[in-house]
Image (cartoon, rainbow, N blue to C red):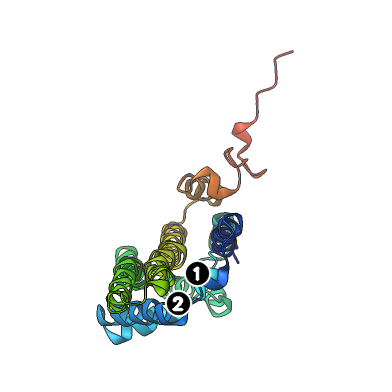
Amino acid sequence: MDPATLIGLLLAFGSLYAMITLEGAHVEALLIPAPMILVFGATIAVGLASTTLKDGLQALKTLPRAFTGKVAKPQVVIDRVVELAEKARSEGLLALDAEATEEKDPFMQRALQNIADGTDGEELRILLEDEISTKARADRQSSKFYMSMGGYAPTIGIIGTVVSLTHVLENLSTPDTLGPMIATAFVATLWGLLSANFIWLPIGGKLKRLADLETERMTLLMEGMLAVQAGSQPRLLGERLRAMVPAHEMGTGKPAKEGKSGNSDDKPEAKAA
């Protein structure tokens, strides 16, 4: 679990609470049911109206992933691919059939099964690329749903304010109540801006980042599996895959150290007596 989204939202709302307190205002003044119902209810409604029902429901199902979603670390993926490469070189590609039955990742499982079945390399690449493209398209759709809600919310808040101000103009004969009524009218605009920038846009951005990371992971696996099928040397394969990953995502700012299984030619020659 990556706590970045939860921490960020808590800090954002904490900053808002600090401002309200320092200004001498009260949180209860913002927790008015009518504008909150309009902003949140109408935003979700127009978000659903802007897409298909299936896409909208799928996006709602992916909401928890913004808080609990995680992607396997690149080093874990590379280590697994290198392990499979070593087994394929020592026992043959048919040995990967047993690995496929034990593999929990559906994407890698299908890749291993196709390799063991003798699928042509180019056909396997096309198959895996199509699967990556389909998964990325579905993940991006969920992200777009929340990003669109972030665009609708401020305008819906303004609509709520206009409706409330219309009510204010109907009561000009009671000037003593105008101040509180005007203040209440702007609460809708506040919640529109607040929900967009504190909730919907961050969630949409997080889902997009998770989708990008998942695409990178699957691409790394695809290149690794194709190299295993081609009989690449495990150590060189590991170096190639590490070169595809930014240093900060590997957890270190330095290139990974080479293993101890290097060729004897890499050792310095002994000095002549």
The reply to whether the C-beta atoms of the residues labelled 2 and 1 are less than 8 Å apart is yes
Front residue of 255 and 1: 1
Side of 267 where 195 appears, left or right: left
Residue displayed at 44% across by 75% down: 110
Task: Tell me residue 248's x, y (percent).
Answer: 54, 45
SS under mark 2: loop
Residue 125 falls in which quadrant of the image?
bottom left
Front residue of 241 and 18: 18
Task: Tell me residue 6's x, y (percent).
Answer: 58, 65
What residue did someone put label 2 on? Answer: 62
Q: Which mark is residue 129?
A: none
Q: Residues within 10 Å of mark 1 (few under 14, many from 20)?
A: many
What residue did someone put label 1 on? Answer: 66
Task: Tell me residue 268's x, y (percent).
Answer: 65, 25
Residue displayed at 54% across by 69% down: 67
Quadrant of the image containing the N terminus: bottom right
Q: Which amino acid lies under the numbered mark 1 shown in the image of this protein?
A: Ala
Evaluate whether residue 94 shows in this view: no
